[in-house]
Image: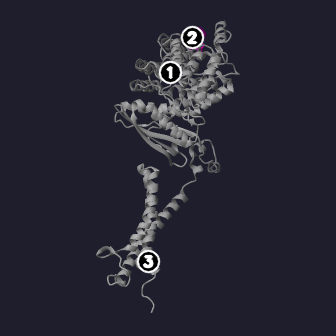
């Protein structure tokens, strides 16, 4: 007689093991899909999704085993008895439980199918990546629909990165200088890694509001990675959290946090730099000795750095005082010496500090920094600028080259190096600086001066308009626009150019008003006396050398050659770099042939049409 004991597969069916397995698998798939959609919204990193997948995989065999061993009954969960035993559930109740499980399976499958259908519908309706990359730009340039659809997919250089301002978690907005300063130092450190292209701090700092996704930032700056994080600074303790994200996939590539003291903050920076270099497989610049072991000196340096970045006369003076205070605490702090040189240079351009007085101080501070640290990039740039101003072109060129060898991503070095190169290589340096630091006003200023010397009025307009967009308070842009419009015989537009800037000081407003009035006088000669009176009032005021250059342009526009000649002699002595293109700059056409001008031209001109035009140097 055959045994009534059921077979293994029949027992699986009786105990509903296969139903539990199917329900678990579909439900697990649903949970994973929901996690991939919801976790990023709450800022949960990708390892959270991976953990969910691992837990679901581990739970599957446990669910199957529990389904075999236990069963759900109206009285609750109890151990499953073998078939045929007196304690076994009646077959009718077993079938009823099976029907309930079938209903659960159907419900879960309906949800799964609905989710799959929704995702397919979204993917079908979503335009391809290349079609949405930059449609507004393509349409503005007259591109056709076909050309927009054929635009290449986002494909930035693999070894490119932007370091976003680390969030200040101290709870005190006044502590932002610390987190920003650490971020700027980290940017400089990453820039010294061979083969890694790093966007400059000045541009990166504009993306610190957290309102744009890594993908959007990557497309805006054409970089493949975004490094972000936060800094919590309280007393001597500091916590630094950092995260590297791909701008192409949106996935996290690396993350870590460090708890340490402010005295060891440089070691933390080295750890982050090494980790990023390892993640991107680029050469690590190597560990450097801590610039200072005095946390207070470091904080004062960071305050000075933040002030110097604002590029006003008052801030340059504040930076000077911060750097001097840091050096009192640590006289061997090379970075603070380099910052001091930058503060003196900023004051010579932004205030009434005479260059002959500032130049020895710049040299002394930069020289001290290099004596302490021969690889100090900022000191090399400052010394190069000092040599350039003294017409020591060969020495300046060598110092810029050394700076770029140490830090290929240093936009300031590219800008100033362009001033000592022939025409096309110089332009290439300005363009590289603008690529590394798209929001750098000085880069656009240099491009505007280059176009002015070349007589390329449309290019001059473009650069000046970029300056206004980046810094509406920079009134120099209005003078560039007015000169370019005049060259294009667009006098009315030259007048309107002065309405596009927003003067930040009463003196700047006075200069803008004088500019507008001067170009109106070119159209309405009856206004000439009024315009001259406005210019004379400004000439008697104490204005910076850069403002004197704008005023000189207005005197030349009105044909006041004698006054312009006197001003030019003082201007060249105050800011020689502004006179190194006297032989080719069309602004000075009215002065050509004057023996005094020709003497100045011979003394200060370092470039001709075959060399780099005059340009601003970066503070």
Inter-mark Cα distance, 1 to 2: 24 Å
Inter-mark Cα distance, 2 to 3: 97 Å
Closer to the N terminus: mark 1 or mark 2?
Answer: 1
Extreme residue in the left direction = 75
What residue sits 57% from the left and 46% below the top?
A: 135
Q: Decide: few, some or many residues near mark 1? Use Cα within 10 Å; few <14, some 14-19, many ≥20.
A: many
Its colouring scheme is one colour
Q: Position of residue 565 (x, y in %)?
A: 60, 9
Label 2: element kind: helix
Please identify, in this view, whether the residue under mark 2 or under mark 3 is nearer the observer.
3
Q: Which residues are magenta?
A: 555-569
Residue labelled with disc 1 = 338
Q: Quadrant of residue 486?
A: top right
Residue 73's label in the rendered image is none
What residue sits 42% from the left and 48% below the top?
A: 43
Label 3: element kind: helix
Residue 580 position (above or below residue 599): below
Pick the front one: 619 or 152: 619
Q: Quadrant of residue 607?
A: top right
Residue labelled with disc 3 = 12
Residue labelled with disc 2 = 573
């Amino acid at each position: 007689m055959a045994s009534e004991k059921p077979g293994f597969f029949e027992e699986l069916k009786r105990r509903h093991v296969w139903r539990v397995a199917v329900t678990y698998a579909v439900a697990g798939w649903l949970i994973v899909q929901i996690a991939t959609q919801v976790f990023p919204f709450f800022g949960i990193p990708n390892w959270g999704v991976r953990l969910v997948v691992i837990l679901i995989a581990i739970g599957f065999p446990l669910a199957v085993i529990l389904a075999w061993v236990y069963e759900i009954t109206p009285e609750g969960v109890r151990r499953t008895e073998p078939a045929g035993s007196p304690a076994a559930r009646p077959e009718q109740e077993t079938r009823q439980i099976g029907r309930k499980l079938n209903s659960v399976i159907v419900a879960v499958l309906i949800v799964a199918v609905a989710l799959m259908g929704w995702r397919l519908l979204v993917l079908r309706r979503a335009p391809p990546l290349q079609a949405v990359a930059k449609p507004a730009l393509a349409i503005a340039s007259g591109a056709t629909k076909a050309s927009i659809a054929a635009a290449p997919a986002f494909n930035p250089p693999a070894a490119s990165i932007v370091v976003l301002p680390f969030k200040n978690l101290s709870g005190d907005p006044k502590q932002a200088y610390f987190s920003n300063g650490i971020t700027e130092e980290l940017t400089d450190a990453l820039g010294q890694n061979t083969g890694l292209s790093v966007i400059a701090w000045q541009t990166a700092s504009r993306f610190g509001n957290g309102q744009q996704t890594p993908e959007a930032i990557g497309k805006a700056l054409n970089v493949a990675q975004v490094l972000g994080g936060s800094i919590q600074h309280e007393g001597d303790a500091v916590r630094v959290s950092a995260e590297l994200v791909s701008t192409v996939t949106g996935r996290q590539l690396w993350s870590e946090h460090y708890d340490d003291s402010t005295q060891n903050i440089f070691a933390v920076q080295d750890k982050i730099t090494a980790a990023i270099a390892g993640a991107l497989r680029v050469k690590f610049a190597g560990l450097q000795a801590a610039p200072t072991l005095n946390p207070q000196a470091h904080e004062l340096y960071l305050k000075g750095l933040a002030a110097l970045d604002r590029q006003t006369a008052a801030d340059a003076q504040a930076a000077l005082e911060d750097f001097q205070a840091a050096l009192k605490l640590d006289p061997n702090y090379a970075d603070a010496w380099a910052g001091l040189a930058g503060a003196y240079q900023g004051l010579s351009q932004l205030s009434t500090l005479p260059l002959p007085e500032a130049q020895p101080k710049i040299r002394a501070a930069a020289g001290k920094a290099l004596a302490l640290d021969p690889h100090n990039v900022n000191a090399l740039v400052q010394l190069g600028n000092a040599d350039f101003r003294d017409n020591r072109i060969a020495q300046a060129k060598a110092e810029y080259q050394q700076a770029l060898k140490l830090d290929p991503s240093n936009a300031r070095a590219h800008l100033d190096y362009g001033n000592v190169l022939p025409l096309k290589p110089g332009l290439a340096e300005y363009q590289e600086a603008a690529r590394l630091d798209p929001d750098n006003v000085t880069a656009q200023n240099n491009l505007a001066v280059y176009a002015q010397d070349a007589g390329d009025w449309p290019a001059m307009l473009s650069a000046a308009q970029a300056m206004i967009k980046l810094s509406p308070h920079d009134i120099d842009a209005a003078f560039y626009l007015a000169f370019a419009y005049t060259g294009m015989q667009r006098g009315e537009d030259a007048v309107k150019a002065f309405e596009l800037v927003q003067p930040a000081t009463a003196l700047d407003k006075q200069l803008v008003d004088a500019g507008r009035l001067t170009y109106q006088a070119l159209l309405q000669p009856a206004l000439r006396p009024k315009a001259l009176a406005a210019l004379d009032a400004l000439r008697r005021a104490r204005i910076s050398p850069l403002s004197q250059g704008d005023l000189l342009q207005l005197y030349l526009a009105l044909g006041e050659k004698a006054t312009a000649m006197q001003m030019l002699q003082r201007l060249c002595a105050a800011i020689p770099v502004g006179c190194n293109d006297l032989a080719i700059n069309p602004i000075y056409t009215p002065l050509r042939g004057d023996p005094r001008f020709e003497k100045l031209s011979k003394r200060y001109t370092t470039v001709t049409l075959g060399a780099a035009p005059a340009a601003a140097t970066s503070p």
